[in-house]
Amino acid sequence: KALARANNIADLRALARRRLPRPIFDYIDGGADDELTLRRNSSAFADYELIPDVLTDVSNIRTETRLFGQEVRWPLMLSPTGLNRMFHPDAELAVARAAARHGLLYGLSTLGTTRIEELAKEFAGPKVFQIYVFKDRGLTAEFVARCKESGFHGLALTVDTPVAGNRERDRVNGLSLPPRLTLKSFMSFALHPGWSLPALTGSKFDFANVSHKVDALASGPMSLFDYIGGQFDRSLTWRDVEWLASEWGGPLAIKGVMTPEDAKHAIASGATGVMISNHGGRQLDSAPAPIDQVAAIRDVLGDGPDVICDGGVRRGADVVKALALGATACSIGRPYLYGLAAGGEAGVDRALSLLLEELERTMILAGINDISGIRARHVRSRGSRR
Ligand code: FNR
């Protein structure tokens, strides 16, 4: 019905906007400060042109690749996002199941609402766990042990969040976690009965993977949100990456790297890849768009490490551009969250189908029959027309 009529990610965003109470939609959709980086992440893709080859036999298209050491069907992964149960009661499991159907790598957030063990039990596909390092360092070692035990294939260490970004939409909306009925938010919640009301009680969701450490403290006057944010360890340095890499011993990406220098640091410290990311424009506003950093970072890292372009991807063609600039894959956050909010697992499925169909069609039209055959000559920055 409505999902089937969604022709692109923008349509799914519109559906999500209609379905969710305003504070919840804005939590997904918004960015930091003036949202300059949020807008730039997507609009930067428009500054690249795709240069097609013709008559290359595009009757068979190969899209398989390796990410975090795992075989995946497409060069696209699902970025870790927190609090999925607030968007739909089926939460992370709905997202992971849709990812599995398409053979995509799934990322579970530290601040997800599904436990590491439960996700692993329900989802046999390739999966990575995203780690935030808390002041309580014991939690990090515990995450590593639980991920090993549960058969996770990789870790992503998020390093762009020493403090929470200034999300002004959330302030204006008075968003708190668990969501509380304020006079301001009441009308919006009341007008969206389709959204799952049980979440309002707070009993249906919590930070499943860290709640055993925060339950006792979360009921105070401070919101759970502020409390959690205050627990991130700001003293983190590259030495901690060395420690994590040796403790884990498997594929490890540093998420939030934006420069060639830091990308080199990451690999020297034991990481096997980087996720070029500004957290979807939710942290440092005015940070550059990930797509604009891909070529320089691939240049210093050479062929081996995973280079994942995370942020602003809204069309399959965006993925082809990122790969032509040197990325191993792209990663998406909001596109699947809009789908989740619009229609649970079926909505995520729709979001992924749309992007993958677009990606395949773009490859055919650009005369590229194998993603390993995407070259720098397939993309051109409009600023440097040759
Ligand atoms: C995020 N992101 C994120 N990243 C992370 O490392 N840990 C987390 O818990 C979250 N949570 C989160 C919640 C929501 C609602 C959003 C939209 C994003 C960032 C995410 O992993 C990714 O970097 C961005 O979403 C990528 O940008 P796009 O695809 O949303 O433009």
Image (cartoon, rainbow, N blue to C red):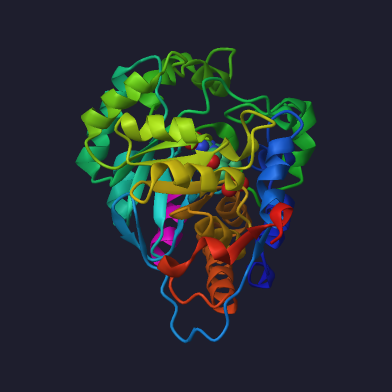
Hey, which quadrant is residue 190 in on the image? top right
At a point 58% along the width and 50% down the height, the residue shown is 337
Which residue appears farthest toward the front when viewing the image? Answer: 386
Q: Measuring from the top left, give residue 364's x and y in whole percent.
A: 55, 78
Q: Nearer the viewer, residue 245 or 270?
A: 270
**Where is residue 344, by image quadrant?**
bottom right
Horizontally, is 315 left or right of 215 in the view?
A: right
Residue at the image position 29 percent from the left and 25 percent from the top: 242
Residue 261 visible, this angle = yes
**Position of 26 compared to 82: left or right?**
right
The relative height of residue 381 versus residue 159 in the rendered view (above or below) is below
Which SS does the magenta portion mostly show?
helix
Tally of numbered discs: 0
Question: Which portion, as a residue range, is magenta?
Answer: 92-101
- Residue 230 position in % (x across, y down): 52, 15
| Rendering quarter of residue 26 | top right
| The one of 102 and 219 positioned closer to us in this rendering | 102
Which quarter of the rendered image does ligand 1 occupy?
top right
Name the image quarter holding the N terminus: bottom right
Q: Position of residue 151 (x, y in %)?
A: 23, 46
Is 123 displayed left or right of 285 in the figure? Answer: left
